[in-house]
Image (cartoon, rainbow, N blue to C red):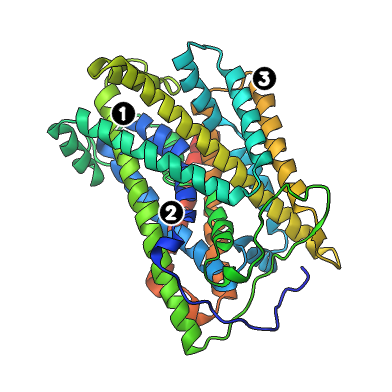
Amino acid sequence: MNNEINKNPKLFPPAPTLKKLIGPSFIILALGLGSGEVILWPYLASNYGLGIVWGACLGITFQYFINMEIERYTLVKGESIFVGTAKIFKKAPYWFIFSTFLGFGLPGIIAASAQIFGSVLGIENFKWLAILFLILIGIILSTGKTVYGMMEKITKTVILLGIPFIFILTIILASSADWSLLAQGIVGKGEGFWFLPSGIALATFLAAFAYSGAGGNLNLTQSIYIKEKGYGMGQYSQKIVGLFANFKNKQQVKLIGENFVATPENLKNFKKWWKLISLEHLLVFWFIGLLSMMFLMLLSFVTTHGVLGTAEGINFVIFEGQIIGQLLFPALGTFFLVVISIMLFQTQLGVMDSTSRIMAENVAIKTLAKKSNSDINLSKIYFGFVWAQIMFGIILFLFNFYDPKTLIILGAVINAFAMFVHIGLTSWVNYKQLPSSCQPKLWRRLIMLGIFLFFAFFSGVVLIDKFF
């Protein structure tokens, strides 16, 4: 890659207030709302009770540490983790393109959105509605002039309106006994089991665990988003705005970040940044995300646990709306289904944007490595991946492969393996690329090693269970 080393070091920028940092964590939180939070964990709670809440707590805690190590690299280098990985592993961009398209090209989230919205409209064959939703997502992303700014506004709005509504419903409907079962589930105590109930599908549990947050390669987009937000050395990076404003022309693309000298002042600024972004991610991603999962699981348990038919697809969500309508009043149950459908639609929108960014950046990395100049049409590459994923989803729907639960679980299992890979790559890149003064402390390295081994073990168990 050209300009791999910037010879003129920069000053590490001073940290702003916490309020000015808020944004990227909302996006990555919203990316998980449509898979683990809204679908998989509530599905498990509906069918197996609240004794598996510990898995959601552990899963999102794992992702907090994973995301922070991804943020660490970009904070220090001012470039995405993909650029850093490609410096050490030249073939890594091919893996990121392949695994991202395979893991997230399966359109389970938008299929779930269409099925739930279709139930409100009385549409049984929801695949046509799902195709319409996919095309609408393509139009939204293609016409947005500032994609990051648009995504930040949409995700903040959906989270700040949708999540409080879920919280209020849960508080109204849950009894003290239900809250007690939730508390017991945090430590793994279920009704007649500890940690895992008999009969639970390991693939479904791993899928939910992997989607306790964003999951798969989506965790890595935190690197791109904080660069565009201007975290740390990312303030010197090129901001990709108006992705389609210059669609016909090539543009100069600068993917390589900047260096700084490890002076006391620069290191002081780095530590201040690290403290603030750790707190921002803890409050927005971990705390709000954990509360969201627990409330959604509790609401699902209160309304549908023990109801016949909840194991079939995502019927439990539709049953939730119907029972909420019966317990309170019908319009509220319908409104619940509309809110969930919108949350799922927004998640698919965010996933489409994030995955297209990942694949476009990795194509750019390989392209620039072979060129003597830095002219490339990044907009066209991004646009191509957006519509390639849309066409792939439409083809699957036309061939009647559109059951939401099947698509989500299959994609999540693939993404769990992708997480195992990128956890190892991120840890190694941070060790090799970052100055010792900015590297993680020993206790964080041990945590990352434990997470890496967990995903290695669980992915292996699921693969053996499914294929051998």
The residue depicted at 23 percent of the width and 18 percent of the height is 327
Residue position for label 1: 300
Disc 3 from disc 2: Cα separation = 35 Å
Task: Pick the quarter of the image with the N terminus.
Answer: bottom right
Q: Nearer the viewer, residue 388 or 98?
A: 388
Residue position for label 3: 399
Q: Amino acid at mark 1?
A: Ser
In the image, residue 117 above or below residue 372? above
Within 10 Å of disc 1 (Cα), the crowding (few <14, some 14-19, many 20+) is many
Q: In the figure, residue 376 lies in which quadrant? A: bottom right
Q: Position of residue 191 (x, y in %)?
A: 20, 32
Q: Amino acid at mark 3?
A: Phe
Does the CB distance between marks 3 and 2 fall below 8 Å? no
In the image, residue 216 above or below residue 397? below
Q: Nearer the viewer, mark 3 or mark 1?
A: 1
Within 10 Å of disc 2 (Cα), the crowding (few <14, some 14-19, many 20+) is many
Q: Amino acid at mark 2?
A: Gln
- What secondary structure is marked by label 2? helix
Disc 3 from disc 1: Cα separation = 31 Å
Q: What is the number of the mark on residue 89?
A: none
Q: Nearer the viewer, residue 215 or 230?
A: 230
Q: Is residue 447 visible?
A: no
Residue position for label 2: 63
Labels 3 and 1: the sequence-earlier one? 1
The residue depicted at 48 percent of the width and 64 percent of the height is 69
Q: How many marks?
A: 3
The residue depicted at 34 percent of the width and 40 percent of the height is 293
Within 10 Å of disc 3 (Cα), the crowding (few <14, some 14-19, many 20+) is few
- What secondary structure is marked by label 1? helix
Q: Position of residue 221 (x, y in %)?
A: 57, 54
